[in-house]
Amino acid sequence: MLAHIDESGIDSNVSIKLTQFGLEIDPDLAYRNARRVVEDAVRRRNFVRVDMEGSNVTQATIDCFKRLRDEFGLNDVGIALQSYLYRTMDDARALLKIPARIRICKGAYNEPPQVAYPDKKDVDDNYVRVMQLLLSSGVYHGIATHDPKMIDATVEFAQREGIGKDAFEFQMLYGIRRDLQEQLARDGYRMRVYVPYGKHWYPYFMRRLAERPANIWFVMKNMFK
């Protein structure tokens, strides 16, 4: 994929899930496999995002990312965080000290109330708090959301704080709220489209729907928008 991006010249990077690199078998194996990808991206002057998965591997994912970040630059490798986890604000503060480029999303896995906010309002409130922390850091981050309220909160905060449109980017899934994607682009914001790729994209998509019932409603609702 990195080679195809390089050949086409498209403004694109890759996002990887460490469980697909052996994280639940051996964290060191996942690190070695992920390192090969990041090393190739660096040669091509590209960027790799370490995606976040279920809370059972949150710490292992962060630990692996830190190992990669120790070896590579700020613009070589980044990480994602999920606002529905209680721990996320503390994780964001700690990662910004390195520093790190972060994608903030709400989270799509079915998590117990012991580790994640069960109410949408609390998830949204935490999202806004983390977004404001990220935008104030001076580091280039990804604001991943399809929620118009979260987008409005981001735009309003950036305007109020004098943060330029080129200082961060919005991110959305391919095919979801394309109207919002196009509007943000017309308004001069950077808009990155997240595209699941490869032969097994459909099983991946179905797993995401099955992991959390709210995901099904989210997709169905947005199909009609």
Image (cartoon, rainbow, N blue to C red):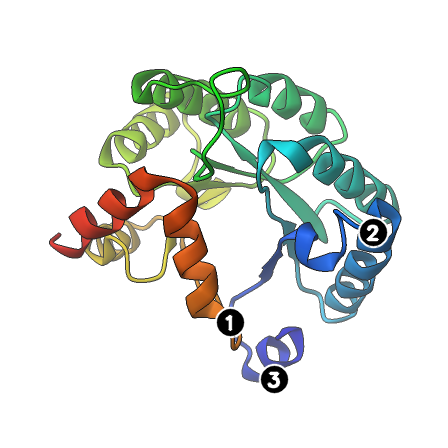
Image quadrant holding the N terminus, namely bottom right
* Quadrant hosting residue 45: bottom right
Looking at the image, residue 170 sits to the left or right of residue 47; the answer is left
In the structure shown, which secondary structural element does the residue marked by tag 2 occupy? helix
Looking at the image, residue 51 sits to the left or right of residue 64; the answer is left
Q: Which mark is residue 164?
A: none
Looking at the image, which is closer to me, 75 or 92? 92
Q: Earlier in the sequence, mark 3 or mark 2?
A: 3
Q: Earlier in the sequence, mark 3 or mark 1?
A: 3
Residue that appears at 63% across and 40% down: 101
Residue type, mark 1 in image: His
Q: Is residue 85 above or below residue 19?
A: above
Closest to the camera, between mark 3 and mark 1, is: 1
- Give the distance between the C-alpha atoms of the residues marked 3 and 1, in whole angstroms: 23 Å
Residue 194 in the image, given as x and y percentages of width and height: 44, 58
Closest to the camera, between mark 3 and mark 2, is: 2
Q: Residues within 10 Å of mark 3 (few under 14, many from 20)?
A: few
Residue 190 visible at all = no
Residue 5 in the image, given as x and y percentages of width and height: 58, 76
Residue that appears at 72% across and 35% down: 62
In the structure shown, which secondary structural element does the residue marked by tag 3 occupy? helix
Residue matched to label 3? 7
Residue matched to label 1? 200
Closest to the camera, between mark 1 and mark 2, is: 1
Residue matched to label 2? 31
Residue type, mark 3 in image: Glu
In the structure shown, which secondary structural element does the residue marked by tag 1 occupy? loop
